[in-house]
Image (tube, rainbow, N blue to C red):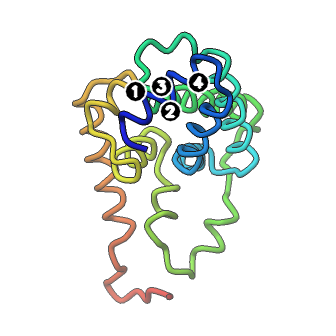
């Protein structure tokens, strides 16, 4: 959906058109899913975050002042929902180091880019998903996450270093299992 149609759809939805709101959500559903999945990992948590995001967006749509900023606005709501779920999980976690079953199973499997991105810490993963998968400019990411553009660039730099290290073929006498 291009910017003109997006703005038009948002205005229709703000005017009470449920169909326009449904079209907006339908056009963004994969983007919302990718972002939630990158932050949360769990399918159930993703579904919860997206559902809460849609409800909150629908309930507060009339408060959106710039219809052209709908996409960034709904991403911000989703990110906040993901952080709420993550905070809730941290409070419920038992102390001690958590071992991921997928880490054990993936030891002998080929690691692909998405799996490695999923292993990044939340702050790095979020900027990588927004920048590389959602094609958002650094300036927009900074505004969305309420951080400076320099911080976004720094996180992207750190994420690239981690990704490069994890994707680099193992050498020095070790065998890489494919």
Mark found first going from the N terminus, 1 or 2: 2
- Pinpoint residue 132: horizontal percent, then vertical percent: 35, 52
The residue carrying mark 1 is: 144
Quarter where residue 59 is shown:
top right
Residues under numbered marks 4 and 1 in contact, where contact means CB atoms less than 8 Å apart: no
The residue carrying mark 2 is: 75
The residue carrying mark 3 is: 73
- Please state which of residues 13 and 79 is positioned toward the viewer in this rendering: 13
Can you tell which of label 4 and label 2 is closer to the viewer?
Answer: 4
Looking at the image, residue 144 sits to the left or right of residue 97; the answer is left
SS category of the residue bearing label 2: helix
- Pinpoint residue 93: horizontal percent, then vertical percent: 74, 37
Q: Residue 13, labelled with which disc?
A: 4
Can you tell which of label 1 and label 3 is closer to the viewer?
Answer: 3
Mark found first going from the N terminus, 1 or 3: 3
Can you tell which of label 3 and label 4 is closer to the viewer?
Answer: 4
Residues under numbered marks 1 and 2 in contact, where contact means CB atoms less than 8 Å apart: yes
Mark found first going from the N terminus, 3 or 4: 4
Rounded to the nearest angstrom, the CA distance separating label 4 from label 1 is 22 Å
Residue at (56%, 26%) from the top-left corner?
77
Rounded to the nearest angstrom, the CA distance separating label 3 from label 2 is 5 Å
């Amino acid at each position: 959906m291009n910017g003109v149609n997006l703005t038009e759809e948002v205005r229709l939805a703000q005017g009470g058109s449920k169909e326009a709101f449904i079209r907006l959500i339908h056009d963004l559903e994969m983007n919302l899913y990718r972002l939630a999945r990158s932050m949360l990992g769990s399918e159930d948590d993703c579904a919860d975050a997206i559902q809460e995001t849609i409800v909150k967006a629908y309930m507060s749509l009339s408060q959106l002042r710039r219809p052209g900023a709908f996409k960034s606005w709904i991403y911000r709501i989703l990110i906040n929902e993901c952080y709420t779920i993550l905070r809730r999980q941290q409070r419920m976690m038992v102390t001690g180091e958590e071992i991921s079953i997928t880490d054990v199973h993936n030891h002998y499997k080929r690691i692909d880019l998405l799996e490695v991105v999923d292993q990044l810490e939340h702050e790095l993963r979020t900027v990588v998903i927004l920048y590389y998968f959602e094609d958002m400019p650094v300036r927009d990411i900074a505004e969305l996450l309420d951080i400076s553009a320099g911080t976004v660039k720094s996180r992207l730099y750190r994420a690239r270093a981690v990704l490069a290290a994890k994707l680099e073929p193992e050498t020095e006498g070790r065998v890489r299992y494919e």
